[in-house]
Amino acid sequence: MAASGVRLVLLGKPGAGKGTQAALLSQHYGVEHLSTGDVFRAAVAQGTSVGLEVQRYMDTGELVPDEIVIRVVDEHFAAGGPLEAGFILDGFPRTLVQAEELEQVLADHPLELVLNIEVPTEAILDRIAGRRVCVNCGASYHVNKRPTVDWTCDVCGGDVVQRDDDTEAAVATRLEVYDRQTVPIIDFYCNLGKLVAVDGVGDGDEVQERLIKEVDGRFAPGRP
Ligand code: AP5
Ligand code: MG
Ligand code: ZN
């Protein structure tokens, strides 16, 4: 087994727990967590040119156009990004075009596993309605699982607020867009023999154990 870290993608509907689990897994395996949603939200907050381009798509729940997403991800990997060290991708890829592009970018460092976190839509709606996120680092909380001190992020001390796209209308669009544009990549990864479905119902620690079991079960134990 190569001495590099894990290279994983987390798939799942909006609110399935990708961000929550990616943060836990990145600590567990000591690899970077890259969420394109977090990258775009930071760009919007900072008012960068990418932020200005993507905000209208995000606010309505539509996908950002592939060429913008691919440019941002390519720049990330090109700038000495974590190809060797390993990574967990969250929210990317989410179209067939993006999945095919990623296969090219990772030609010498192929993905090891794509974990599809499955949660019924009723549970999703409850999770999203109660979600609060850190404006600074993107950490995810819930009205039933708050930060230790008021609405201040446990990780970085940033403000914890409701996301602009967690409105009823935007969530309905995000779920519809997921079915239409992201579900086809489940078959794509299935055909590559990389897809594993994981039950995302239960508390966060239980889901994390299931994910780690799948990853470690396929690779040598004790890898970094
Ligand atoms: P993105 O930020 O990726 O949003 P999403 O896919 O809609 O997913 P979410 O972040 O809403 O959910 P999550 O699965 O991370 O769940 P979380 O862990 O927070 O994308 C946002 C937008 O950016 C897109 O709509 C698009 O416009 C654009 N975009 C981003 N990437 C793009 C791309 N590649 N291509 C094109 N456009 C792109 O959990 C949800 C809640 O549930 C939290 O409150 C959490 O505390 C709680 N929770 C988590 N786990 C559990 C559990 N086990 N039990 C109970 N509650 C739980
Ligand atoms: Mg997320
Ligand atoms: Zn934070």
Image (cartoon, grey):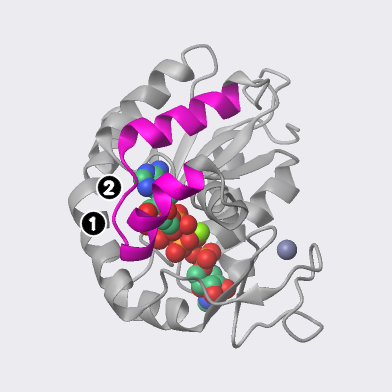
Residues under numbered marks 2 and 1 in contact, where contact means CB atoms less than 8 Å apart: yes
Q: Main secondary structure of the magenta part?
A: helix
Disc 1 marks a residue whose amino acid type is: Val
* Nearer to me, 1 or 149: 149
Q: Does 187 sit above or below residue 16?
A: above
Distance from mark 1 CB to nearest ligand 1 atom below 8 Å:
yes
Which numbered disc, 2 or 1, marks the residue that appears first in the sequence? 1
The residue beneath circle 2 is 182
Residue segment shown in magenta: 50-77
Q: Using the image, tell me which numbered label, if any, was put on residue 107.
A: none
Distance from mark 2 CB to nearest ligand 1 atom below 8 Å:
no
Position in image of residue 16 (x %, y %): 43, 65
Position in image of residue 198 (x %, y %): 43, 56
* Nearer to me, 8 or 134: 134
Task: Using the rendered image of the protein, determine whether residue 166 is visible from the camera's viewpoint.
Answer: yes
* Residue at 62 percent of width and 52 percent of height: 46
The residue beneath circle 1 is 177
